[in-house]
Image (cartoon, grey):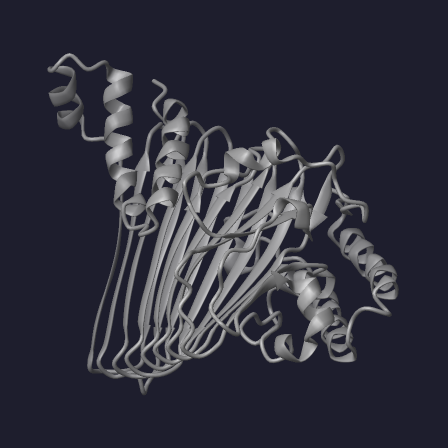
């Protein structure tokens, strides 16, 4: 399918989609949807001449005539989603199947007074005025075709609102699960609002049935108020046949503390964009990432931390492990604006290439317009240490097991930063489940 034809296909579907929501969407949301689809019509899908996308070929996505998921609920059981739930974790759970909220699979635990944790569709029906100030507040669709499409077509998602002073003692777990017999596309939209002096831990997981072919186009918006503390774990465990494009946008206010662990373990074609804007003073922002690739998978991570005000700190560490013919991309940008004096920013990308055919394109970037700053960035790409392999093998450990031990040690640096112990254990198990593939000779 040609790019122009694919673009026209989405534009044609939009009118039908909008007509079906004529009696459910508030007028202001309809206006946003129309503006977003008009912008998509203008910018179109990115191509190889687009600097931000030159290592990520969108043709497999564009050339597949994905359809929206059927309106009727998919017959998914608790047993099907059980591998993606977290054992021994007491928390509120929101489950979405093919992009739509499944009440029978979800359960809410105790929440602070005044908090709202529900599906986005429900929030738009019960209190649209609460959603209005936050949808598209962070996620700009001016230049990003996939964000524009999500804004135009998003049918449901998670809405988490914590008022000022609220402290969520238990994590909030959001699971987006896809299952299909035909290629479908879903547009999950997640909005997290942490009021002033509030605290929350959010787990956002994407998963799908083994071997199933589908496309997830996800957008997450996180607003951290003054002195708020938010830990965000984003776990991508899609089918190895699936396509996944995500945009996470974070807006932080004075003295906010934000930490994200972005873990990519699945997907055939994966693109993760993370943008954090440090919009006031004394903000602490941490972005950590881990990605594993084997076969011919492609995993592209683009991050941007925008230091807009002085006296803020940011720390970023992304690690990748690529085997077989897998290909990785890392593009990390740190912007330090003219007024952002006393900025302290550190960025590191480390990659292990486990085969001669695996490749990585890494581009750490600093753009500094202030003079009183401490900023560092760097990238290292290498293979497993042969001396360490020899050391382990000399003690009776087979080569494959020795490789797995070293790969696990490399990855554990990121996993160990997850503060939610049951989630950390689950990620360890998922990682170990893939290590035999990563450790093949």
| Residue located 36% across and 55% down the image | 363
Image location of residue 96, percent across then percent down: 64, 49
Residue pushed farthest bottom?
Answer: 339
* Res 28 quadrant in image: bottom right
Question: Can you see residue 63?
Answer: no
Q: Position of residue 67 (x, y in %)?
A: 78, 46
Total marks in image: 0
Specify the quadrant of the image occupied by residue 309: bottom left
**Quadrant occupied by the C terminus:** top left
Q: Residue at x 32, y 87 (%)?
A: 339
**Image position, residue 438 (x, y; %):** 37, 27
The quadrant where residue 76 appears? top right
Left or right of residue 335: residue 299: right
Q: Is residue 344 above or below residue 298?
A: below
In this rendering, position of residue 28 left or right of residue 408: right
Quadrant of the drawing holding the N terminus: top right
Residue at image position (49%, 60%) is: 110
Depth check: 27 or 410 in front?
27
Q: Residue 318, relative to residue 127: is it above or below?
A: above
The answer to whether residue 109 is visible is yes
Q: Residue at x 43, y 38 (%)?
A: 87
Q: Is residue 122 above or below residue 289?
A: below
- Relative to 381, is 30 on the left or the right? right
């Amino acid at each position: 399918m040609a790019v122009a034809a694919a673009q026209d296909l989405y534009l044609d579907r939009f009118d039908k989609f909008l007509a079906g929501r004529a009696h459910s969407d508030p007028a202001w949301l309809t206006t946003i949807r129309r503006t977003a689809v008009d912008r998509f019509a203008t910018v179109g899908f990115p191509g190889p001449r687009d600097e931000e996308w030159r290592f990520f070929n969108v043709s497999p996505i564009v050339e597949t005539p994905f359809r929206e998921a059927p309106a009727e609920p998919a017959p998914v059981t608790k047993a099907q989603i059980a591998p993606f739930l977290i054992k021994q974790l007491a928390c509120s759970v929101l489950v979405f199947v093919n992009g739509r909220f499944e009440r029978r699979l979800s359960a809410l635990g105790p929440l602070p007074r005044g908090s709202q944790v529900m599906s986005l569709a429900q929030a738009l029906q019960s209190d649209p005025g609460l959603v209005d100030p936050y949808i598209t507040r962070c996620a700009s669709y001016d230049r990003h075709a996939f964000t524009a499409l999500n804004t135009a077509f998003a049918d449901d998602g998670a809405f988490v609102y914590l008022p000022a002073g609220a402290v969520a003692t238990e994590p909030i777990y959001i699971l987006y699960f896809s299952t299909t017999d035909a290629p479908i596309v879903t547009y999950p939209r997640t909005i997290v609002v942490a009021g002033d002096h509030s605290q929350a831990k959010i787990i956002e997981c994407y998963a799908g049935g083994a071997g199933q072919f589908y496309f997830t186009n996800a957008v997450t918006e996180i607003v951290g108020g003054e002195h708020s503390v938010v830990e965000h774990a984003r776990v991508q465990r899609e089918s190895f046949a699936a396509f996944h494009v995500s945009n996470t946008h974070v807006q932080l206010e004075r003295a906010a503390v934000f930490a994200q662990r972005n873990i990519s373990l699945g997907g055939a074609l994966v693109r993760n964009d993370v943008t954090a804007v440090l919009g006031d003073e004394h903000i602490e922002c941490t972005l950590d990432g881990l990605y594993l690739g084997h076969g011919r998978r492609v995993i592209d991570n683009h991050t941007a931390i925008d230091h807009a005000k002085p006296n803020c700190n940011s720390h970023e560490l992304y690690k990748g492990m690529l085997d077989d013919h897998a290909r990785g991309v890392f593009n990390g940008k740190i912007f330090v604006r003219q007024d952002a004096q006393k900025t302290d920013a550190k960025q590191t990308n480390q990659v292990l290439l486990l085969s001669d055919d695996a490749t990585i394109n890494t581009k750490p970037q600093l753009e500094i317009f202030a003079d009183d700053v401490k900023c560092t960035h760097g990238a290292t790409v290498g293979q497993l240490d042969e001396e360490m392999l020899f050391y382990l093998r000399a003690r009776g450990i087979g080569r494959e097991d020795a490789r797995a031990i070293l790969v696990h040690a490399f990855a554990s640096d990121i996993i160990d930063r997850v503060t939610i112990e049951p989630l950390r254990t689950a990620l360890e198990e998922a990682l170990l489940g893939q290590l035999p593939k990563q450790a093949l000779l």
